[in-house]
Image (spheres, rainbow, N blue to C red):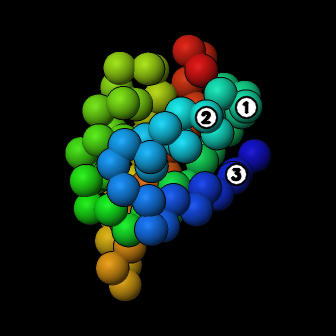
Amino acid sequence: MKYTLDARRLLCPMPVIRTQDRIAALQPGDILEVVATDPGVINDIPAWCRINGHKVLATREERGEVVLEIEVGDES
Protein backbone atom coordinates (compact mmCIF):
# COMPACT_ATOMS: atom_id res chain seq x y z
CA MET A 1 0.00 0.00 0.00
CA LYS A 2 1.08 3.57 -0.59
CA TYR A 3 0.44 6.38 1.90
CA THR A 4 1.20 10.10 2.03
CA LEU A 5 2.30 12.23 4.98
CA ASP A 6 1.92 16.00 4.73
CA ALA A 7 4.79 17.50 6.76
CA ARG A 8 4.64 20.91 5.08
CA ARG A 9 5.28 23.96 7.28
CA LEU A 10 6.80 21.80 10.03
CA LEU A 11 10.33 22.51 11.22
CA CYS A 12 12.96 20.11 12.56
CA PRO A 13 12.48 17.78 14.34
CA MET A 14 8.74 17.53 13.65
CA PRO A 15 8.92 16.07 10.09
CA VAL A 16 11.07 13.20 11.40
CA ILE A 17 8.82 12.65 14.43
CA ARG A 18 5.67 12.62 12.26
CA THR A 19 7.38 10.22 9.83
CA GLN A 20 8.33 7.94 12.72
CA ASP A 21 4.79 7.96 14.11
CA ARG A 22 3.22 7.24 10.70
CA ILE A 23 5.62 4.42 9.85
CA ALA A 24 4.91 2.77 13.22
CA ALA A 25 1.31 2.26 12.03
CA LEU A 26 2.31 0.74 8.65
CA GLN A 27 3.32 -2.75 7.55
CA PRO A 28 6.72 -3.84 6.17
CA GLY A 29 6.78 -3.22 2.42
CA ASP A 30 4.32 -0.31 2.56
CA ILE A 31 5.44 2.92 0.88
CA LEU A 32 5.19 6.27 2.65
CA GLU A 33 5.55 9.46 0.63
CA VAL A 34 6.58 12.38 2.86
CA VAL A 35 6.04 15.91 1.54
CA ALA A 36 7.90 18.61 3.49
CA THR A 37 9.01 22.21 3.14
CA ASP A 38 11.91 22.02 5.63
CA PRO A 39 15.04 21.42 3.51
CA GLY A 40 16.67 19.63 6.46
CA VAL A 41 14.57 16.53 5.77
CA ILE A 42 16.83 15.77 2.80
CA ASN A 43 19.45 14.61 5.34
CA ASP A 44 17.42 13.97 8.49
CA ILE A 45 14.85 11.47 7.21
CA PRO A 46 17.33 9.28 5.27
CA ALA A 47 19.59 9.18 8.37
CA TRP A 48 16.62 8.15 10.54
CA CYS A 49 15.66 5.49 7.97
CA ARG A 50 19.18 3.98 7.96
CA ILE A 51 19.16 3.72 11.76
CA ASN A 52 15.68 2.18 11.86
CA GLY A 53 15.82 -0.28 8.96
CA HIS A 54 13.74 1.56 6.37
CA LYS A 55 14.73 2.34 2.78
CA VAL A 56 14.52 5.68 0.98
CA LEU A 57 13.45 4.83 -2.57
CA ALA A 58 13.48 8.36 -4.00
CA THR A 59 14.11 11.96 -3.02
CA ARG A 60 13.12 14.89 -5.18
CA GLU A 61 12.44 18.58 -4.91
CA GLU A 62 9.49 20.17 -6.65
CA ARG A 63 8.06 23.67 -6.27
CA GLY A 64 9.90 24.39 -3.01
CA GLU A 65 8.90 21.07 -1.45
CA VAL A 66 10.95 17.98 -0.70
CA VAL A 67 9.31 14.64 -1.47
CA LEU A 68 10.74 11.39 -0.09
CA GLU A 69 9.45 7.91 -0.82
CA ILE A 70 10.19 5.45 1.97
CA GLU A 71 9.73 1.69 1.99
CA VAL A 72 8.84 0.48 5.46
CA GLY A 73 11.29 -2.11 6.79
CA ASP A 74 10.81 -4.91 9.30
CA GLU A 75 11.95 -2.84 12.28
CA SER A 76 9.03 -0.38 12.43
Residue 73 makes an appearance in the image: yes
Separation of marks 1 and 2 at Cα, in angstroms: 7 Å
30 versus 59 height, above or below: above
44 versus 62 height, above or below: above
Label 2 or label 3, whichever lies nearer to me, is: 2
Pick whichever of labels 1 and 3 is earlier in the sequence.
3
- Mark 3 crowdedness (10 Å alpha carbons): few <14, some 14-19, many ≥20: few
Q: Quadrant of the C terminus?
A: top right
SS of the residue under disc 3: strand
SS of the residue under disc 2: helix
Are discs 2 and 3 less than 8 Å apart at CB? no
Q: Is residue 5 left or right of residue 67?
A: right
Residue found at x 36% / y 56%: 11
Which mark is on residue 25? Answer: 1
Separation of marks 2 and 3 at Cα, in angstroms: 16 Å
Pick whichever of labels 2 and 3 is earlier in the sequence.
3
Residue denoted by label 3: 2
- Look at label 3 and name its amino acid: Lys
**Closer to the camera, 5 or 17?**
17
Residue found at x 29% / y 32%: 47
In terms of image quadrants, where is residue 74? top right
Separation of marks 1 and 3 at Cα, in angstroms: 13 Å
Residue found at x 60% / y 48%: 32
12 versus 24 height, above or below: below
Are discs 1 and 2 less than 8 Å apart at CB? yes
SS of the residue under disc 1: loop
Residue denoted by label 2: 21
- Look at label 2 and name its amino acid: Asp
The percent coordinates of residue 18 (x first, y second) are 55, 43
- Look at label 1 and name its amino acid: Ala
**Closer to the camera, 16 or 45?**
16
**Closer to the camera, 70 or 19?**
19
